[in-house]
Image (cartoon, rainbow, N blue to C red):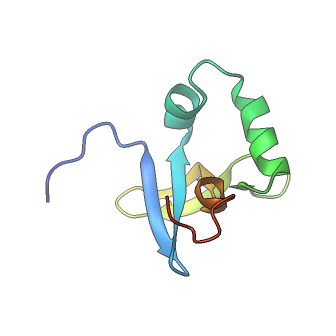
Amino acid sequence: PARIINRAGFREEINDAWHYFVFADAFETEVCNGLNVRSVARVLKERGYLETDKGRLQFSKRLPKVGSKRVYYIRPTLLTDGDPDGDI
C-alpha cells in the first residue's frame, strides 16, 4: 500500500455504512475551514451527526497504527440524510 501523507483521520464500515473519525487538527483546518470549531461541533451534535463522549464534543477511539485518540466521530447520516437510498 502507498504511504499516506497528511492523514485527516480514519473511516470504518459499520452496518454497511462508513463512519468517519476525524483528527482534531483536520476537523479545524479542513472541515471547519475558518469557522468556529466548537460551534460547528455543537450544531453537528444537536442534529445527530456527531457522536461524542459524555460532556465532550470529541470521541475516544482506538485507531489502527495510532492507538487511542480523541477524534470527531461523524456519523454516516451527515452524508446520506435527504437521500432515502443512501447513495451519494
Q: How many marks?
A: 0
Of the pair 78 and 22, the residue shown nearer to us: 78
The image position of residue 30, as x and y in percent, is 49, 30
Residue 88: % across, % down: 49, 58
Of the pair 46 and 37, the residue shown nearer to us: 46
Q: Is residue 37 left or right of residue 21?
A: right
Residue depicted at 60% across the width and 62% down the height: 76
Residue placed farthest to the bottom in the image?
15
Q: Is residue 26 left or right of residue 83?
A: left
Query: Does residue 44 lie above or below 87 as drawn?
Result: above
Res 38 → quadrant:
top right
Q: Quadrant of residue 53?
A: bottom right
As rendered, which of 64 and 50 lies closer to the eye?
A: 50
Residue in the foreground of this view, choosing between 56 and 10? 10
Q: Residue at point 52% right, 26% down?
A: 29
Identity of the residue drawn at 56% across and 38% down: 24
| Extreme residue toward the top, this view | 34
x%, y% of residue 65?
34, 60
Q: Is residue 81 above or below residue 55?
A: below
Image quarter of residue 10: bottom left
Query: Is 29 located above or below residue 83 in the figure?
Result: above
Residue depicted at 47% across the width and 73% down the height: 13
Q: Position of residue 74 (x, y in %)?
A: 62, 54
The N terminus sits in image quarter: bottom left
